[in-house]
Image (cartoon, grey):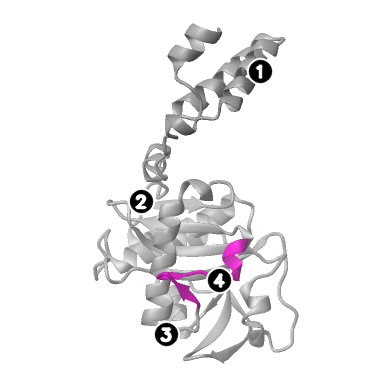
Amino acid sequence: MIIVIDGLNKDRYTGLLDQMYQLRARVFADRLGWDVTVRDGKEIDQFDALDPAYVLGVNDDGRVVACVRALQTTGPHMLADVFSDILRGEPPLRSATLWESTRFCVDTQVLERGKSRNSVSYATCALMAGSLEYAKNSGISDIVTVIDPVMNRVLQRSDCAPYGYVGETTPMGKVPAMAALLDCTDERIAKIRAFAGIEGDIFLDPARCEALADPVEQAPMDVVDDSLEFYCREQVAQATTEEERVAAWALMSRLRDVGMIAGRERLVGGYR
């Protein structure tokens, strides 16, 4: 199943992101021998600091088994700033409706062969379909992706052949690289789904997403900030409308639930 993590919710899914970075290290550094930076077992580059969107495939155990990164082309991105030799002097493509897809990989150590739901083939197609659906629903019309000839053949076999290429195939380290173009259309998504036998919604439902989020840590009572509690009580006291009063109590309740202010007994008994 697919989950999307971006700049809005990344702070709630640091555990899944760590799994993703570790998977990228195993694939791109260990297996493919790319010249990438790995620290503490995680492959992270400068583009991860730009709040990209990550489309992750997770198995039934909640483990990240596939991932891809989506980044806007209107700012820094890999084809413009790392793989520019592919362009042969031509300017990079830049458009608000064109995203760059990079760091596409699946966990071949965990996934099976064949075409079962837990196979490399199924996970690859589900990730492709999920990333295209997410892009289309976000108003993106096309994707440019830097791939090697092996991945190009995977796309062709999965009935997801690129509709065009940018620049020329160029040696990049141990393997040649090319920039391929994919359109985010219902037709392309349907072909991928049909090839892999994917039916129904492939995105995790809200309850499952919540279950995979980082646990909320309770603040120990000996570090509770009395000034925060005082602020909450002041907001309740100064509320001039029922809407403001309800909002103030809702904030107080939330802070109490996570242990940042005192419990209900003190709030109700002492201050209300």
What is the CA distance from the residue labelled 1 to the residue labelled 2? 50 Å
Location of residue 210 with respect to 165 vertically, above or below: above
Dot 2 lies on which element?
loop
The mark nearer the N terminus, 3 or 2, is 3
Residue on which the image places disc 3: 33
Relative image position of residue 25 (x, y in whole percent): 41, 73
Q: Nearer the viewer, residue 78 or 2?
A: 78
What is the CA distance from the residue labelled 2 to the residue labelled 4? 35 Å
Question: What's drawn in magenta, residue-wise?
Answer: 37-49
What is the CA distance from the residue labelled 3 to the residue labelled 4? 16 Å
Residue on which the image places disc 2: 199
The mark nearer the N terminus, 1 or 4, is 4
In this rendering, the label closer to the viewer, 1 or 4? 1
The mark nearer the N terminus, 1 or 3, is 3
Query: Could one spot residue 50 in this view of the protein?
Result: yes
Residue 159 lies left or right of residue 143; in this view the side is: left
Location of residue 186 with respect to 205 vertically, above or below: below
Residue on which the image places disc 4: 45
Find residue 235 and name its label. Answer: 1
Instruction: Please tell me which residue is depicted at 50% across the width and 77% down the height of the picture.
Output: 37
Relative image position of residue 177 (x, y in whole percent): 54, 85
Q: Residues within 10 Å of mark 2 (few under 14, many from 20)?
A: few
What is the CA distance from the residue labelled 3 to the residue labelled 2? 35 Å
Q: Nearer the viewer, residue 39 or 184?
A: 39
In this rendering, the label closer to the viewer, 3 or 2? 3
Instruction: Please tell me which residue is depicted at 37% across the width and 74% down the height of the picture.
Output: 26
Amino acid on which disc 4 is placed: Asp
Instruction: Please tell me which residue is depicted at 32% across the width and 56% down the height of the picture.
Output: 63
